Amino acid sequence: MTMRRGPAPKPGDQPPNPHRRQFLVGSAMVAGTLAMGSVIGAGAVAGGPARSAVAAGPQPYPVGTAFPVGWYAIRPEFFDAERDNGATIAHIYAPVDVPTAVDYLAEVDDADLTALCRLPLASTTEPKQMPPLATAVAAITDRASAPVAWWDLPEEMRYWYANEMAVVTDYVALTRQHDPQQRPNHMYLPNHYRASAFAEYVPHLDILPVSAYRSYAAMEPAWIRWRMQQMHQAVDSVSATLGPDHLAGEKTITAALELFASAGKPVMTAADARHDFWAALTGGAKGIMIYSWAHRTDDPLLAAALDSYHDCIDTLLNTPGLASALLFGEVVSVATGLVSGPAQAAPFQPYGVDAPITLPSYDVRVVEHQGHQYALVTNSATSPVTVEVSGLEPVTGDGGVVTVTVPALDVAIVSR
């Protein structure tokens, strides 16, 4: 993408966005056998176990059952290694002409991956609008036999410009008409949008990505939770429903996380990557895309963040039952209480918000699936917290109460 040009931004429009440049997660959890009623993760383990290769699996959610984990801007020579590290989705920015795109998709297929498959604009300059109908239809039909996970509409189409929203609505209609598999539609949305802006797109998109580039935005850790809450509020505001049946109008919330460096901005650390990954999942994300593979070498410090993402993906996919539970499980209402540690996370003031926002230091998500319960307890404070979770299914006389201590910017995962 190119930097913004043309008309002055509407109030609430985005600040400069890292996606306009051309061109994976969580803690290395405590090793051990998954046991009923056990805390299977709390804190990073230096020199932890080697990551397990992840075999090629089914189509990513919501069409299939694989947990969506993907890289923006990844080239084919890295496909095999990242598939073995748990990736299921590949993406590339340029070029988008049909012959080259089809070649890229063939290599995606050869690597047993799927694609976040870009669809073109008539031009990247203003005004942004649909290509001729025949070109738009060909962009779909020429890719229809490819392993498309989600159709990727041109990024950041602005809802207050009719020509840009026409790109969204026209492509949504055309993919339903010309893709025999009617796969889901996705469009990257800016890093600062709040619930009211997200709500403009919820009726049209199947995949609702929450961009959460925290270091780039210079926000405190709890901002990730707030970002996820904004999309949930948007879904509720238009009476939409979350779920896997996109053809019946159900929606999937995902997160776009950060792996790049920008001049004058903080460089994310391993702890940042670990926190943001699990905070997004605790906030209800059912897929993770990371921006970007191409920028992973922007700064030497990002190597540790990349390793942290890989460790998080490994924990997510190789903790028995966890990924499926986060996709298909029922959310369980529980009671929580702070036993020790800071009550509040550091305050933050998002772009366009008039006053700082303060959230509790921790967040909890409990899901139940196929007779098992999984609890994520994510700490957004820079000191450890001890949290009591009650209302779980009782195990061995514990009354359904679990107490966990979570290190700073980390997660505890409880399975029972």
Image (tube, helix red, strand yellow):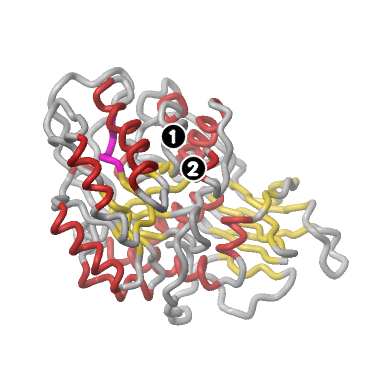
Q: Are marks 2 and 1 in contact (CB under 8 Å)?
A: yes
Q: Residue at x 28, y 70 (%)?
A: 79
Q: Main secondary structure of the magenta part?
A: loop
Q: Quadrant of residue 165?
A: top left
Q: Which mark is residue 222?
A: 2
Q: Which mark is residue 348?
A: 1
Magenta span contains residue 165: no
- Residue 70 image point, x, y percent: 36, 59
Q: Quadrant of the N terminus?
A: top left
Q: Residues within 10 Å of mark 2 (few under 14, many from 20)?
A: many
Q: Relative to 215, is 129 above or below? A: above
At mark 1, the secondary structure is loop
CA–CA distance in space, label 2 to label 1: 8 Å
* Left or right position of 148 against 75: right
- Residue 304 image point, x, y percent: 33, 66
- Magenta extent: 153-157
Q: Quadrant of residue 163?
A: top left
Type of amino acid at the residue the image marks with label 1: Phe
- Residue 319 image point, x, y percent: 57, 71
Q: Relative to 80, is 322 above or below? A: above
Nearer-the-camera pick, 31 or 171:
171
Nearer-the-camera pick, 142 or 299:
142
Q: Residue at x 20, y 51 (%)?
A: 93
Q: Does residue 404 appear in this view?
A: yes
* Left or right position of 94 against 236: left
Q: Which mark is residue 160?
A: none
